[in-house]
Image: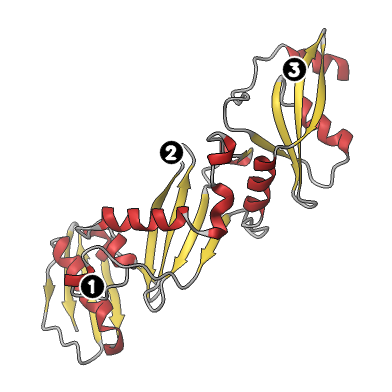
Amino acid sequence: MKKLLWMMLAALPMQAVANEEDPIAYKCYYCTPAEMEDVALAQGVGRHYVYDANNLNIVGFNVESAGSSLIATSFTAEDWVERQFKGMMGLYSTYDGSMEAFIGNVELLAPGSDHGRTSQRLWGHHLSLLHPEHRRARETVRRFLRGTPELAFLDIASSGGKLLRFEYMLEVDRPINVRLSFPEYGVARFYLDHATREWKFLDAKVALKPIQQQAGDFAPKQGNTYYRYSWIDRGWAKAFLDRAQWANVPVHGQFDDSRDVNFRCERKDDDIQCYIE
């Protein structure tokens, strides 16, 4: 029966990932070397990597046809493969299977900050699609991430441009994320686009509220959505007003930055109006 299985596998075309393409790592938890070999054989002809997340171990296998069967020859994973593997596993959450890095106390200057109404520090407001300078702001973050030591394992200069992928990434869109914390200005998330090798903006929050990317975000559902800012955080409130203006969302009422402010944004069908209360 086992021989028949290998004959069938040998007849399969070579896997999509060959030597010149990104390697794929297949899981095998608390496995013996023989069990890891079986995992590699099950992938058919090609070059495969098998990893044990519990023991932080990754092994390479060259699987070839040998008559009517397949044979697997193990080899030590390249340094760059092991470095990427261990770096990614360092971000792995056993709770939900995500891979996310956290970088705190990020202080970057925002584009045009010398003449801006809000803080000169870059934060989620500048990354919003509504902000006129969001492209420059996002590029600033991308360049920052490329030089961040915690993410140095993703540098593909030594791998000939190759980037390790885990098998589950082929079936579920679960990219590597990074969450940046801006002192006093909330958080923003970027994800690594595997195809382009670029960090792309995902979302941002301040005061636990999402920062709007388009007009519909001010009131994402029918009825009222509230945004409350204390007078201490008046910079957030002023930024809210800017985003509403850029989105052509009317804000009714008089803004007073010497007191707390509550914005009520109401959606009626496709019409959105905001009110200062």
Q: Amino acid at mark 3?
A: Leu
* Residue highlighted by disc 2: 196
Work out which quarter of the rendered image holds the N terminus and state it. top right
Q: State which quadrant residue 78 falls in.
A: top right
Horizontal and vertical percent position of residue 203: 38, 59
Is 96 situated above or below 234? above
Answer yes or no: is residue 220 visible.
no
Q: What amino acid type should be assigned to the residue bearing mark 1?
A: Ala
**Residue 183 in the figure: left or right of residue 23:** left
Q: Residue at x 71, y 19 (%)?
A: 45
Residue 46 visible in the picture: yes
Q: Residue furthest bottom?
A: 258
Q: Position of residue 27 (x, y in %)?
A: 73, 41
Q: Which residue is mark 1?
A: 239
- Nearer to us of marks 1 and 3 is 1
Q: Secondary structure at mark 1?
A: helix
Identify the image quadrant of the C terminus. Answer: bottom left
Q: Position of residue 148 (x, y in %)?
A: 50, 59
Q: Earlier in the sequence, mark 2 or mark 3?
A: 3
Q: Are marks 2 and 1 in contact (CB under 8 Å)?
A: no
Q: Residue at x 60, y 39 (%)?
A: 165
Q: Earlier in the sequence, mark 1 or mark 3?
A: 3
> Which labelled disc corresponds to residue 61?
none
Which one is in front in this view, the residue at disc 2 or the one at disc 1? 2
Residue 9 got which mark?
3
